[in-house]
Image (cartoon, grey):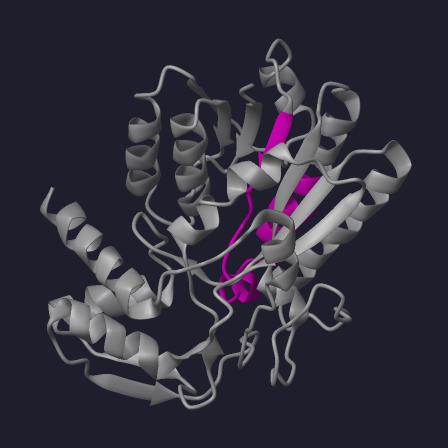
Amino acid sequence: MGMDVLLTGAAGFIGFHAARRLLDEGHTVIGVDNLNAYYSASLKLARLARLRKYESFTFHSLDISQKSALDTALEDSRITHILHLAAQAGVRYSLENPHSYIQSNVVGHLNVLEFARHRKAIEHLVYASSSSVYGERAAVKGFTETDRVRQPASLYAATKLSGELLSESYARLYDIPQTGLRFFTVYGPWGRPDMAYWIFTQKILSGDPITLFAPNLMQRDFTFIDDIVDVLPKIISQPASHHDIYNLGNSAPNKLHDLVTAVEMACGGKAEIILKPQQAGDVQKTFADISAAQSAFGFAPKTDLQTGIANFVKWYRDWHQA
C-alpha cells in the first residue's frame, strides 16, 4: 500500500531525488519548500518542474520556521509519513549567517515535530541529520551512531545535533516513531552549487583556479545520491520502535586530492590550484560506520567517487547546454 509522504525541502538536492524515487514507486508526495535564496532559485524551480509532472505530487511554497505554516497549508491533506529534509545547509555559511540556521534547523525542526504531534495518523517521521555532529576526531575506524557527540565544530553541526535531541524528547514525550539519518557528504546530479565538487567542475571547465583548504589533511566520506535514495523508501516504510539514528555514508573516505583528480578526469582538464590553510568549522575527516544501516535496511552503497563524479559532470555539461 502506498504511503502519503510529507516531504520538506522538496526543491532541494536530496529532497528532489527522494521525491522522485518515492513517486516512481507509487507513493503520494506532498512537497514543501521555502525556495530561499541561499543558491539560485532557478535550479530549485527546475527540480520542481520535473516533480510536477507526476500526478501524485503536490507542492506548497512555505517556510517551516513560521509557526503553524504547515497546519494552515496542510489542514485537509492526508499524511501518513514525514520525510523532513528542509534545512539551512553549509558549514561555512553558518559563520556568516547564524540566525538563519537557528530558524531553519532548530525552530523549523520543532515545528515539524509539533505538526507530527497533532496529526495522529503519522506512522513515522524520518529526518536528516548530518555527519557534522561527530565533530573533529581521530578516525582510524568509522564513526558509529553510539559515539559521544558533544563537541560540534560549527554552528551548523550544533543545530543538527539540536534536532536530534529535540526528536529524542518528542519521541519520549509523545510516542512519535522517528528515525534520524546522518548523511555523509552526499553528491551527484542536481546537486548544490556551494559544494566543492560543483565549484571544482565549474572552475576547471572555465579555466579558473580552484582553492584547496589544507588538502593534505582533508578526507571526506563522499556518498553518491543514488545510493542514498535507493534505501530511503524502505527506511520510511519501517517505523522505528522509538527513535533510531543511522549513518548513511559510503564508508570509504577519499582525500580531497582524490576529488580533484576525479573532477579533472571527468572534465578532461587540469586544475590550477591555490593552497590555503584549514577553515574554521571544517573537520579534517569523516568516515561512516554503516553496519547498523546495512543490518536494518540492507544499505549497500556501490558507487565509487570516480564513477559518481563522472555522472555529475555529464549532468553538469547537459544542464549548462540546455
Residue at point 61%, 68% (across, down):
289
Residue sitting nearer the eye, 295 or 37: 295
Vertical placement of 319 versus 149: above or below? Answer: above
Residue 261 is left or right of residue 158, and the answer is: left
Q: Is residue 153 magenta?
A: no
Residue 11 in view (yes/no): no
Query: Residue 53 appears at what percent x and percent y?
Result: 30, 21
Q: Which stretch is magenta? A: 81-109
At horizontal 88% and vertical 41% (from top left) the residue drawn is: 172
Quarter the C terminus occupies: top left
Q: Quick check: 294 above or below 238?
A: below
Q: Residue placed at 76% from the left, 36% from the top?
A: 177
- The answer to whether residue 83 is seen in the rendering is yes
For the N terminus, the image quarter is top right
Q: Residue 308 in the image: state x and y as whole percent.
A: 30, 61
Residue 101 sits inside the magenta stretch: yes
Q: Nearer the viewer, residue 239 or 99?
A: 239
Quarter assignment of residue 206: bottom left
Report which quarter residue 237 is drawn in: top right
Q: State how many labels appear.
A: 0
Taking the spot 50% from the left edge, 62% from the top edge, the residue there is: 93
Q: Residue furthest top?
A: 76
- Left or right of 254: which side holds 210? left
Q: Residue 253, how many percent across, how many down?
A: 47, 75
Q: Is residue 129 above or below residue 251?
A: above
Q: Quadrant of residue 205?
A: bottom left
